[in-house]
Amino acid sequence: MARYRGALCRICRRETEKLFLKGDRCYTEKCSVERRQYPPGQHGQRRGKLSDYGIQLREKQKVRRTYGILEKQFRLYFERAASKKGVTGELLLQLLETRLDNVVYRIGFAPNRVSARQLVNHGHFLVNGKKVNIPSFRMNVGDVIELREASRELSLINDSIAKVEHRGVPSWLELDAKNYKGKVLQIPAREDIQLTAQEQLIVELYSK
């Protein structure tokens, strides 16, 4: 599947806010959004006012790029959320949050979602005792995620766990750092999702 291979900091600058795509760097003064608070490119500082459609599009792109998924896959997530009972925007974010790669990141096993996706692809994690290497695998309440015994010496994972207090573990997840385990306690409510997004704008965009 195609993936964005360019500079991650350009994505944050394009959306003019931190999407925390590079992990620890985003919390330091080296963050490009802190240093250059305007979109990239030679016309970045001269961009005009966005239309209503432009605002909706940017909100959709921000969420899509935060979770690192492609347009077609994002549309499928929206259609799945729209087919369920409840608030479509909130359901969309819940579907994205409960992806395995996102849970790996949120719980502290990886410094960012890019690393989390790679670790999942390489088969480093077990879900309920079975190896899962599909980043989009959906986690449910009560599911237990565990790092494989053979992977517990990886410095990337250990360094990330050591720094997990810096960003914290969401209340809907539980981390047992000593045993390299985590658990999904509940489906996250909107206030539990650490994302500055106006999901209603995405619903309006796709509803046209």
Image: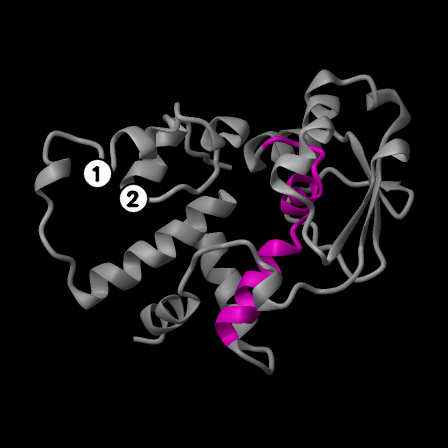
Q: Find disc 2 in the rendering and name its residue.
A: 16
Position in image of residue 90 (x %, y %):
54, 70
Q: Is residue 178 left or right of residue 55?
A: right
Q: Find disc 1 in the rendering and name its residue.
A: 38
Tell me if I can see residue 92 in this picture. Answer: yes
- Is label 1 in a helix, a strand or a loop? loop
Residue sitting at 48 percent across and 26 percent down? 25
- Is label 2 in a helix, a strand or a loop? loop
Q: Give the range drawn in magenta.
A: 88-111
Other-residue count near label 2 (Cα within 10 Å), few / some / many at <14 / 14–19 / ≥20: some
Do callouts 2 and 1 mark residues in contact (Cβ within 8 Å)?
yes
Position in image of residue 167 (x %, y %):
61, 40
Other-residue count near label 1 (Cα within 10 Å), few / some / many at <14 / 14–19 / ≥20: many
Q: Is residue 80 left or right of residue 14?
A: right
- Looking at the image, residue 12 lies above or below residue 194: above
Residue 86's tag is none
| Residue type marked 1 | Tyr
Residue sitting at 86 percent across and 29 percent down? 148
Q: Identify the image quadrant of the C terminus.
A: bottom left
